[in-house]
């Protein structure tokens, strides 16, 4: 298959490009580089041992996207392009709704016009909202607590409606839990601009000496040690889940499918911090501070649907996630070269 990967220069996108190529498909990147570095492409070419076709475009641009599809001969699309910072989405809801909904709509309309029907969507476990059942299953109702999350819920709904209107579509909605880690080579990884919002990149920057101390957001939750509990998944396991979904879409008759991509293993903030300290051999000094507004105490995936239907499972442990993150962070203390 010739697969267009929007947002393919980003953190999850770049790891997915390598998995798509490793599975024997061709991967074409479309990215506007608004939250990705051009150096990623050099690293991907080095790891893949071949040139990679890259289009520097914003997929909310209808004319540019249409031209891309007119010339592209794509068999499938994996759509990552979108804004993803929860706090920023609360401050700038209009920008989030416009960018995330527009990019999905523009890509889907171009696919429709050019007869491409296989679509894999980058969704999030955030769509499970505040359900009291902590082990999330795909049949739970969806909702959100911030504009970023609502864009995921809304795009999922658009995809359901599209599948009802035209059953020649083959759509996979992938709900990610907490993606962390880096490619085992240490050549590509997560490179957040500014202060990291998420736990793992913050811990990694403390270990390498870029930040002094971690703030642990609350230790009085009803969890194993009082800190927040999540399901961390290695980005390479996540990437292989995309390839499994892409290939599965070629075999099934349903136009719309949803799969959780998680490890199924609950891990607390302090468990992750301790694992990182072991992997890096560095202390991770931290202060316990107030809870972060909007945080849920605990949730994790029931990944059994993806295990059964995709023949896929997350194989890398928390120790692997920390070791690989540390290899990336220690070899690239300031992230990608400018
Ligand atoms: C966040 C987003 C979620 C998004 C996901 C992507 C929020 C509220 N949610 O999930 O919508 O899909 O990222 O991976 O931002 N923590 C600390 N100190 C820190 C950072 C985090 O203690 O400096 C704790 C948090 O309280 C939480 C855990 O670490 O218990 C994980 O946090 P984070 O990595 O930000 O991910 P989520 O909040 O789960």
Image (tube, grey):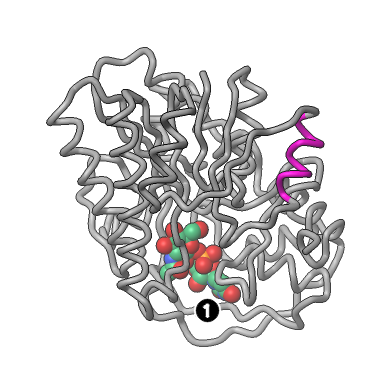
Q: Nearer the viewer, residue 94 or 196?
A: 94
Q: Is residue 335 left or right of residue 107?
A: right
Could you tell me residue 162's position as x and y percent?
19, 35
Q: Is residue 72 magenta?
A: no
Q: Spot the residue most to the left.
A: 165
Residue beneath label 1, please? Answer: 217
Please determine whether, in this image, residue 65 is positioned above or below residue 142.
above
Q: Main secondary structure of the magenta part?
A: helix
> Is 171 rendered above or below residue 325?
above
x, y percentage for residue 303? 42, 37
Residue at (76%, 62%) from the top-left corner? Answer: 335
- Residue 249 percent across, percent down from the top left: 37, 21
Q: Is mark 1 within 8 Å of ligand 1?
A: yes
Please say if 3 is above or below 45. Answer: above
Front residue of 221/294: it is 294
Compared across the picture, whether 221 is left or right of 325 comes to left
Q: Residue at x 79, y 35 (%)?
A: 47
The image quarter containing residue 301 is top left
Q: Position of residue 216 (x, y in %)?
A: 58, 78
**Stretch in magenta:** 40-48
């Amino acid at each position: 298959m010739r697969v267009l990967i929007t947002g393919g220069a980003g953190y999850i996108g770049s790891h997915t490009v390598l998995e798509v190529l490793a599975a024997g498909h061709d991967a074409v990147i479309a990215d506007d580089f608004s939250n990705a570095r051009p150096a990623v492409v050099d690293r991907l070419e080095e790891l893949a041992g071949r040139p990679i076709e890259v289009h520097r475009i914003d997929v909310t641009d209808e004319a540019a996207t249409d031209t891309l599809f007119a010339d592209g001969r794509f068999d499938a699309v994996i759509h990552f392009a979108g804004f993803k910072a929860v706090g920023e989405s609360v401050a700038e809801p209009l920008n989030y709704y416009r960018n995330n909904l527009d990019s999905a709509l523009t890509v889907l309309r171009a696919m429709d016009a050019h007869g491409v029907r296989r679509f894999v969507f980058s969704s999030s476990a955030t769509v499970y909202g505040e359900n009291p059942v902590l082990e999330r299953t795909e049949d739970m109702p969806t909702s959100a607590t911030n504009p970023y999350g609502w864009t995921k819920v809304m795009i999922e709904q658009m995809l359901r409606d599209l599948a009802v209107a035209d059953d020649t579509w083959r759509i996979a909605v992938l709900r990610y839990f907490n993606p962390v880690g880096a490619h085992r080579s240490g050549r590509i990884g997560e490179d957040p601009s500014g202060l990291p919002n998420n736990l793992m990149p913050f811990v990694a920057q403390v270990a390498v000496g870029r930040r002094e101390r971690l703030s642990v957001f609350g230790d009085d939750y009803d969890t194993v040690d009082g800190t927040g509990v999540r399901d961390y998944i290695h980005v390479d396991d996540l990437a292989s889940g995309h390839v499994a979904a892409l290939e599965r879409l070629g075999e099934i008759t349903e136009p719309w499918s949803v799969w959780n991509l998680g490890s199924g293993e609950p891990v607390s903030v302090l468990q992750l911090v301790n694992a990182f300290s072991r992997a890096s051999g560095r202390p991770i000094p931290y202060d316990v501070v107030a809870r972060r507004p909007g945080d849920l105490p605990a949730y994790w995936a029931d990944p059994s649907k993806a295990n059964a239907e995709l023949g896929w499972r997350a194989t890398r442990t928390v120790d692997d996630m920390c070791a690989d993150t540390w290899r990336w962070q220690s070899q690239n203390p300031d992230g990608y070269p400018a």
